[in-house]
Image (spheres, helix red, strand yellow):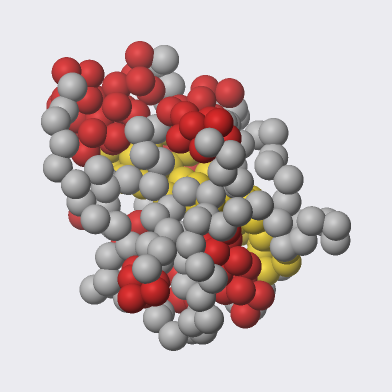
Amino acid sequence: MTDKTTPDNESVTDAPVRRGIKSYVLRAGRMTAAQERGLKEVWPRWGLTLADGRQDLEQLFGRKAPCVVEIGFGMGKSLVEQAESHPETDFIGIEVHAPGVGKLLDEADKRGLTNLRVYREDALAVLADCLPEASIDTLQLFFPDPWPKKKHHKRRIVQLPFVELVRSRLAPGGKLHMATDWQAYAEFMAEVMAEAPGFVNTAPAETAPFVERPAFRPLTKFEQRGERLGHGVWDLIYRRD
């Protein structure tokens, strides 16, 4: 497979994730009527903020059920599909971009979903301040910004402090599922996870450290376009030991 950027030799511990360094850039964009409806009409029911404090997930959803958290859901298509296909599971999406949040809320409401909640906040703050320890069954991080330039690697969300925070929020046996279409970032992720204590790579020996694309991960429009262009995609799934 062809890499999109040159491999780097930077240590994965050189640039720890800090609250002051953002792994994302807020971009202005025009809102559609549906997106505005989602933010104005649906957000009061399903939207969450840091000010809400530490959540009791059983109370939040009104039941005891497995919980999946997705960081950076984009326009929300795959997350809505998962929530609709798995009504027995509760989902929490975290995204900073207003159009995506509005689109997801509008679509979820139109489909009558009740097992989905949304944060429009920094994911690190949500994990640290809002989600209880050992409360998540799966954390999904699909196609995060790879920040390919070496001087920007400190902005990559996958760093040891982030992984350690995720582990504390995963229930024993819970999984961290990452996917990227940048081979250098995939290798960087694998290096970080190799140093992170308390995780077991679920990949079989013949494909390790990566797994074949799981059938349960919805194929995004972004990924479909990449496949047509011949881009590779790398999935990594680790279990909290």
Examine the rendered structure and indicate whether residue 215 appears above or below residue 144.
above
Quadrant of the snapshot with the C terminus: bottom right
96 vs 146: above or below: above
Q: Position of residue 46 (x, y in %)?
A: 31, 33
Q: Please count the marks in the image.
A: 0
Q: Residue at x 14, y 42 (%)?
A: 28
Q: Position of residue 12 (x, y in %)?
A: 51, 79
* Rendered residue at 40%/41% (across/down): 73
Residue 195 picture quarter = bottom right
Q: Nearer the viewer, residue 72 or 44?
A: 72
Give above or below for 75 relative to 168: above
Residue 119 rendering spot, x and y as whole percentages: 31, 45
Q: Is residue 227 visible?
A: yes
Seen from the viewer's position, the closer of residues 47 and 178 is 178
**Residue occupying image coordinates x 67% and y 60%:** 238
The residue lying at 37 percent from left, 68 percent from top is 149
Q: Is residue 40 above or below residue 121?
A: above
Picture quarter containing residue 123?
bottom left
In the rendered image, is residue 220 in sight? no
Left or right? Give the position of 89 relative to 215.
left
Q: Is residue 66 left or right of residue 38?
A: right
Residue 120 shown left or right of residue 64 in the figure: left
Looking at the picture, tell me which residue is in the foreground, 233 or 198: 233
Point out residue 192 in the picture as x, y percentages from the top left corner: 57, 73
